[in-house]
Amino acid sequence: MKNERRVGTVSRGIRCPIIREGDDLAAIVTDSVIEAAECEGFELRDRDVISITESIVARAQGNYASVDDIANDIRAKIGSDTIGVIFPILSRNRFAICLRGIAKAAKKIVLMLSYPSDEVGNELVSLDKIDAAGVNPYSDVLSLARYRELFGENKHEFTGVDYVEYYGNLIKEMGAEVEIIFANQAKFVLDYADHIINCDIHTRARTKRILKNAGAKVVLGLDDIMNAPVNGSGCNEKYGLLGSNKSTEDKIKLFPRECRDLVLDIQKRVLERTGKHVEVMVYGDGAFKDPKGKIWELADPVVSPAHTDGLIGTPNELKLKYLADNDFANLSGEELKRAISESIKAKDANLVGNMASQGTTPRQLTDLIGSLCDLTSGSGDKGTPVVLVQGYFDNYTN
């Protein structure tokens, strides 16, 4: 018994140097993980997961663009002085600098905000206030004056920002006229403008389809902007401005460009130096929801833009408490442990539909592990942009 493992999954934040453009990220990550193991006295094992935050990948790539780059790209693609900008998320970090570029490309912006909250749950007004006002958010279009009359000023619970005022002022500061409306059906914007930038993330394909079918002349998603270099800038061929973050007041850090080569390189380096076959992934936002603020964390287009093949798929697990309470309810102690261990060893390769797997999490491995890593590394000053997850693929028999 004394040699029996007593620890399952462990998630460790790994400290790294500050990453700059052009750094050899594969070497830095490999060195940092191996040095952490030596320093802290643990060993790497097969199927450990090394996860790298997308931020340092994009930084090493030098994947940046300026407000002027965004504006120039939009002028070349939109073909109108009046632009309808619909369904943006409410974020100083994520969207405000994108909006600066959009406003700089236009003479007038019709800004259509979804209500009572944006796509990821940032609240403009509470559902209770909506109910009390007798407003139907699915069908009713509110002007700014009507919104203020019904709901007044509403500051974000965590940031203290009135995003309606903030976005309106930002557009005017960039020299454009602004009209703000509130609606949840994409086609309603076409009463105000027919050249549209839809800024939603996970629903963007449907929104584009609805707008085009309703007669919009030009429809761009954020993924259609900065999807190629502008005057030597960075870009993201697949996601454009989606997944971007503010770098400075005039510059944006884009989501990392193709980085599968990076994860494969790190996997190869670790194998050569330690003999262990690890999995490697790049991660951004986790996929979870805050129960108090109702904010869904995932403002990136995906949790993981690149990962090694061992992270493809979903967990295939049995629920221990189901086995203990049902199949082996009459057993206890070593006999129960032995029976559960044998069930795990004999489990099917695919447990879909098996009652003994109910309650296990049917999500992509990269979404689960990426969420764990996002919570481990945080978004502040921990200084651990690499996370090592050990024992994730273990089970009760290991």
Image (cartoon, grey):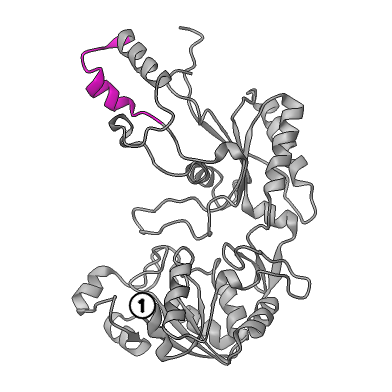
Q: Which image quadrant for residue 235?
A: bottom right
- Note whether residue 384 is visible: no
**Other-residue count near label 1 (Cα within 10 Å), few / some / many at <14 / 14–19 / ≥20:** some
Q: Residue at x 72, y 36 (%)?
A: 30
- Note whether residue 84 is visible: yes
Q: Is residue 363 above or below residue 199?
A: above
Q: Is residue 59 left or right of residue 48?
A: right
Q: Which image quadrant for residue 191?
A: bottom left
Q: Is residue 357 left or right of residue 3?
A: left
Residue toward you, 65 or 394: 394
In percent of width and height, residue 70 lies at 65, 77
Q: Residue at x 63, y 23 (%)?
A: 42
Residue toward you, 248 or 21: 21
Q: Residue at x 74, y 54 (%)?
A: 60
Q: Amino acid at mark 1?
A: Gln
Q: Which residue is mark 1?
A: 185
Q: Which image quadrant for residue 135?
A: bottom left
Q: Is residue 172 above or below residue 126?
A: below
Q: Is residue 305 left or right of residue 201?
A: right
Residue 233 within the magenta-colored segment of the rendering: no
In percent of width and height, residue 380 lies at 57, 52
Q: Is residue 194 above or below residue 24?
A: below
Q: Is residue 107 left or right of residue 286?
A: right
Q: Looking at the rendering, in which quadrant would you find the N terminus?
A: top left
Residue range of the region highlighted in magenta in the rendering: 317-333
In percent of width and height, residue 363 lies at 43, 44
Residue toward you, 166 or 198: 198
Q: Secondary structure at mark 1?
A: loop
Residue 326 within the magenta-colored segment of the rendering: yes
